Amino acid sequence: MDQENERETTGPTAQDVARIAGVSSSTVSRVLNSVKSDMISEATRQRVFDAARQLGYSPNPIARALRGGQTNLLYLIAREISDPFFANFIAVISGQARALGYHIVLGNAHSDPEEALEISHVLDTRHCDGVIVLGDLKDDEAVLPKILAGNHTAVALCRGQSPAWMPTINVDNSKGIHLLWEHLTSLGHQRFGFIDGGWLGDIRERRKAFENLSMTWPIPGMIQEDADGLEGGYRAFQTLISQTPRPTAIFAADDTMAIGALQAAQDAGLRVPEDISVVGFDDIEMAHFVHPRLTTICQPVEEMSRQVLNWILEMIAHKDHPIENHLLSLEPKLVIRESTGPVPLDE
Amino acid sequence: MDQENERETTGPTAQDVARIAGVSSSTVSRVLNSVKSDMISEATRQRVFDAARQLGYSPNPIARALRGGQTNLLYLIAREISDPFFANFIAVISGQARALGYHIVLGNAHSDPEEALEISHVLDTRHCDGVIVLGDLKDDEAVLPKILAGNHTAVALCRGQSPAWMPTINVDNSKGIHLLWEHLTSLGHQRFGFIDGGWLGDIRERRKAFENLSMTWPIPGMIQEDADGLEGGYRAFQTLISQTPRPTAIFAADDTMAIGALQAAQDAGLRVPEDISVVGFDDIEMAHFVHPRLTTICQPVEEMSRQVLNWILEMIAHKDHPIENHLLSLEPKLVIRESTGPVPLDE
DNA sequence: TTGAAAGCGCTAACAG
DNA sequence: CTGTTAGCGCTTTCAA
């Protein structure tokens, strides 16, 4: 068995097209890349097109990348791909990127820190024209520089305040908490609890806002920290309601934790919102489909995604030109559903 | 330490390393790729390593790809990235792929069918060594061949029976429905309803199994179809319970639809499982955190992912060597939680 | 208006 | 053991 005829795997080349059209490969390239009116006779143009179509030719993106230095690939490092909020975010980014001629390459972040980084990540990003960091990784201020080595085209998303060297886009987390706080106080609530998801940057901002609000308030808020996620929300809620007197309204750091909290309320025989109000953050799709439907903050995902891509492509186009405004905060929106209600009467 | 040259985007090359080490670039290549005992003197090997480290050199993957024909990229076309079951699946695949030295490039499928395909997708897959199709796309038997043109290294996942030219891995959907059916009948249920998610391949298999079971059963099952997703599950459930007599147990095509159904039950004032039992399929994480916790079928995601990667890498290694067994069905597992109970007493 | 030629950075065949 | 040479497929001067 000889492996002659190895041409199968690689499609027709510009050379092949050129041969058939009776021109040179450079002409083929010119014709196919002609953005503006090129200096090419209509006759040859046609012949090239015909030949290309006949062969089913499309330029090899790898060769193109090697030549032009652009891969049209964007490396996306997400804190946790399967988190519902991030999963949706990734879908949006990927869709928009496609429309701009780019593809998303998935980098896993939740895997071990250091370890594989040195070996593979550094190398990996060189595949790509730019890097999007979605959500922060544990200790990433130490780790990110390594990942980004040799590829300073990077933008961060949803990680709260970022190092100055990294353009960052967030929803205005503080504003979001304020909106929620206003809503809850207008319902008469006075004793608040906060379920904290830990070290994550955007969540830290929410907690900070909660703390600040608490300080202007007669009754200090309680904060319970646990791992981000359904489980963590469940446990933290249990702890919070075991306090006396217990809070009448609970902020969860995000919707996922809030849904965990809702479950804990159910198991504890507490009715939401009659006995206790719960709010989330993010407005994931599932927030409409839990019982009760979750009052939460909606992040402008589409717009944030558009901005990220804007910046990245801008930076790719003008390599050394740094982005003007390093930090962008977009408007959150309050979505009132069923998980919040008036403070219980006996309070 | 001194970098005089303008090396805008491209890092140091093998040539640079070679120059510093006082060898040729091919020697550099040899040293750095030496898997087995090479015929290289320890002295030069050291000098090359030193020079490489000093420069922070790592080989340009694009050049490598152009040369060797391998990109170590896998194109993943998912029906819907943000679907919770798929999002998790993608995370698992991506993680395992990374461990094998591969990366996942995201192809969006839920965008329009035909349209962009001809232009871009065909070209896109050429970036990649192989293609993974996760879940079926609408009309994909017509569309897939185009996407795959020139890249016959593809494996399908979670799309039920597939065209013979495409190796496929599924959970045993029929078996899963059987498990659920047994569980439900052992609880005394007799009248069943099925919420169908439409044209999707794996869901079609589940429906088929349900229909077959129904035919051996005194009371025919009712089937209500709607779009896959929370909304669809909600609506279909409403329809199903408006029948008289209404079913005492509802199969949902997947967990997402089941969660929508749970919500509809809640809104209709029906208690689950006291008044009606509900089962899902997939065992997404959220299935633990809805009320009541969902009885469902767990798919062996890790194992399926491992198999896919096995096959793909196998196919990449031996280009023309087709996979022996084109269709692989893995074992489903019944997970009993709180959404199923004995048939209501008044039945 | 077009072709020839020179690489992008790497690896593999073929000397030496 | 190691250097030279020759491309992978494309784009882009530079000539013609």
Image (cartoon, coloured by chain):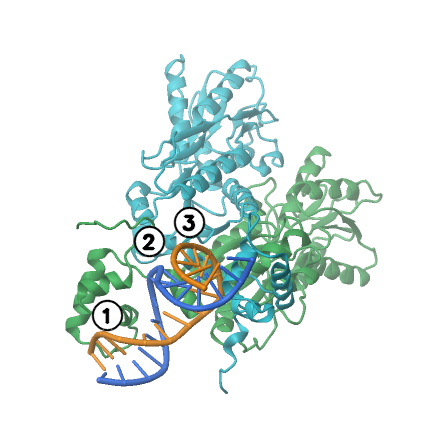
Chain colours: A cyan, B green, C blue, D orange
Which of the two marks, 3 or 1, is nearer to us in this view? 1
Q: Which residue is mark 3?
A: A129
- Residue A84 seen in this snapshot: yes
Give the residue drawn at x 53%, y 61%.
Answer: A27
**Spot occupied by residue B229 in the image (x, y as percentages of width and height):** 66, 45
Q: Are marks 3 and 1 on the same chain?
A: no
> Earlier along the polypeptide chain: callout 2 or callout 1?
2
**Foreground residue, B175 or A284?**
A284
**Spot occupied by residue C7 in the image (x, y as percentages of width and height):** 35, 62
Q: Which residue is mark 1?
A: B24
For the residue labelled by badge 3, is the local secondary structure a helix, a strand or a loop? Answer: loop
**Foreground residue, B154 or B84?**
B154
Give the residue drawn at x 66%, y 71%.
Answer: B164
Kindly identify the amino acid type of the residue bearing the numbered disc 2: Thr
Q: Which residue is mark 2?
A: B10
**Spot occupied by residue B272 in the image (x, y as percentages of width and height):** 67, 41
Q: Is residue A325 above or below residue B82?
A: above
